[in-house]
Amino acid sequence: MASQNISVPKTPINYSIRVDKVGVRARIIRAVRIAAISVVAVIMLIPIAWMSMTAFKSRPDAVAVPPKVSFEPTLEGFVSLIAKTRQLTTEQIAEYEKNPDLNWADRIMLRRGQAIIGVSEYPRRFLNSLIIAGVSTVFSVSLGLLSAYSFSRFSIPGAGDLLFFILSTRMLPPVVVTIPVFLMYRAVGLYDTHIGMIILYTVFNLSFSVWLLKGFLDEIPREYEEAALVDGYTRLQAFRKIVLPQAVTGIAATTVFCLIFAWNEYAFALMLTGDVARTAPPSIPSALGTGGIEWARIAAGSMGFLIPVVIVTFALRKYLLRGVTFGAIRK
Amino acid sequence: MATIELQQVEKKFGEAYAVKPMNLTIHDGEFVVLLGPSGCGKTTTLRMISGLETVTDGRILFDGRDVTWLHPSDRDIAFVFQFFALYSHMTARQNIAFPLQAQGESRAVIEQRVNEVARMLRIEHILGQRPGALSGGDQQRVALARALVRRPAAFLMDEPLGALDADFRESMRAEIKQLHIAQHATTIYVTHDQIEAMAMGDRIVVMSDAVVQQIGTPAEVYHNPANLFVARFIGSPGMNLVRGRLADGVIHLPGGNAYPVPEAWLPALQQAVGREGEVIVGFRPEAADIVDDGPLAGRVYAEDLYGGYTMLHLELETDEIIHVRTNRQLILPIDSTARFALDPAMVRFFHPQTEAAIHQEARP
């Protein structure tokens, strides 16, 4: 028998034995590829690395020429970001140093000759950002989901025109309409309110989320809901129990995109908010003004600003990988 | 279990008919197959019965109760889809339990009923797995279990075996038939595969171009097709249909063949096409016998050996080819002349213009 001549390995081979994967040529190509990707990755990461470093630098280190790569890390930037401070005279510094109940933050600022006299605006604005971006994302995704489902499943008269109309709201740069929106908002009392900003961001994100989610919902075969319908469920129950779990990829991707837009938005936030509803983005550059450029503070603010988006994206990453490669949902 | 009645049910998409007005009564416990080529309206009919599609006009009755405008969930039917439509985020067990949860059954009842159908379909060992991990046959078993578990008034199946491999299909066909015998549940089964329809149906509804062509038992549609479409569509290959000319009680067929019309048929034929006129002669491949002194002859064009039998292709005249089913031992050289006789009981006649079958005696 021919089969007796074939040697069967005792243990399973769990590495590749394919010529096109282990040949010299293949290995070189792979090495080059990895090297190229690494170089690109490093280039991409430099600004983030630089920002993170600056956030932990003291004021002299931050503006040192040539730039310092090794330095003594300090939380000065973060403390000055969230604390309101006052410049002290030399005598006052000496007097302060004798005070026994100084905490670590006080000491850090004292080294710069400043005393903490309260909490800065930044934490509240950061909270505003969280509220406005979070709520508007929830609204734009949930409203978008319902209308995308309707467009995807029901025959709506003039559906094509409606979809085009929805898309057309994205056809000019939003900044163009800041002045009219500002005037309208002031007239109806939405200026500098959380509600106003939430409505605005929801409206801007809605067209995007309708289109994106419609694409995902179209991919889900109707038979799934029809099976649920004949199994005794109402349309809404079928939507909740069958469509939602299947659309989770699309919902995750849409959520992240909407969140990033609402979280990063600068122009409207600057124009339409004053003190009450001001978000974080317009607040960070305001550190430019007072007494020289506070690079450490700006970097600390930017870093803190990245964190929520990073957390959400990270939490949803397993859905995103499939979400960004659209038609990849298995039928 | 239920009797399902369609009264003048029709469906239009825009101006085009998907289903022209049709009447159909499906008796309690009957297995009815809707058969036809794709786009003939059979799936639309099934979907109208299920309520997934609205009717344009007409009424649908379940046990005399008008359900025409009832929501699918209120019709007490189970639907088996061609692509299974199993919920990929649930295990097989959860999939099967899903319809029972809609009815608000208790956990214990659900558990017991799921186990019961799982045993019946021999899928107990895969209940914990997700549909993605199952083979096509097992997926369809789970889909069947989900339909069975509810004990619905009727089962509607839309080409449930269409997505399976050929060998699976045959065993699943037997399984579904077996289930139907055990459950004796009213079943409507859609397929484009006439072999499936013949094998499974108590009755077959043959559809084409949105119109019901014939309703009958498998034997009826096979032996007495109502028109040329049914004659061609049922059987593999379909019925031999040869155009001839009736004159003086003899039908002149291509290739100089003459077929004397059996005594019993003559009055009906003459009434249908006149004393002299065109008529289409139809006979199944097994209605012809190769015999040395047969009255008809053709040139052997090709032979298909099926092992159990041989299908002979005979050319009566250029492009006029008929199929004759013969003994497996019989092998005739290509291009030789074969003589054959027709079994008079199995010959049918069709009107060339109306394409309808001509019947021996006037039917009510």
Image (tube, coloured by chain):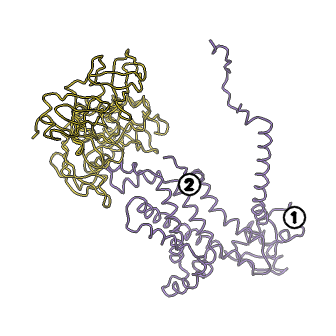
* Relative to B296, residue B76 above or below: below
Q: Give the image location of residue B168, x and y in percent.
A: 42, 30
Callouts 1 and 2 in the same chain? yes
Name the side, left or right, on which B154 lies relative to A150: left
Q: Quick check: can you spot residue B348?
A: yes
Residue B198 or residue B148, whichever sits in front: B198
Identify which residue is drawn at 23% across, 23% down: B343
Where residue B294 sits, quadrant-wise, is top left
Q: Nearer the viewer, residue B138 or A320?
A: B138
Residue type indicated by callout 1: Lys
* Rendering colour (chain B): yellow
Q: Establish if B266 lies above or below B364.
A: above
- Tell me: A209 left or right of A155: right
- Reading the image, the residue beneath label 2 is A326
Label drawn at residue A68: 1
In the displayed orientation, state which residue is furthest to the right.
A66
- The picture's colour for chain A is purple
Report x, y in % for residue B9: 22, 52
Locate the N terminus of chain A and report the quarter of the image it occupies: top right
User: Disc 2 on helix, strand or loop?
Assistant: helix
- Which of the numbered marks, if any, corresponds to residue A321? none
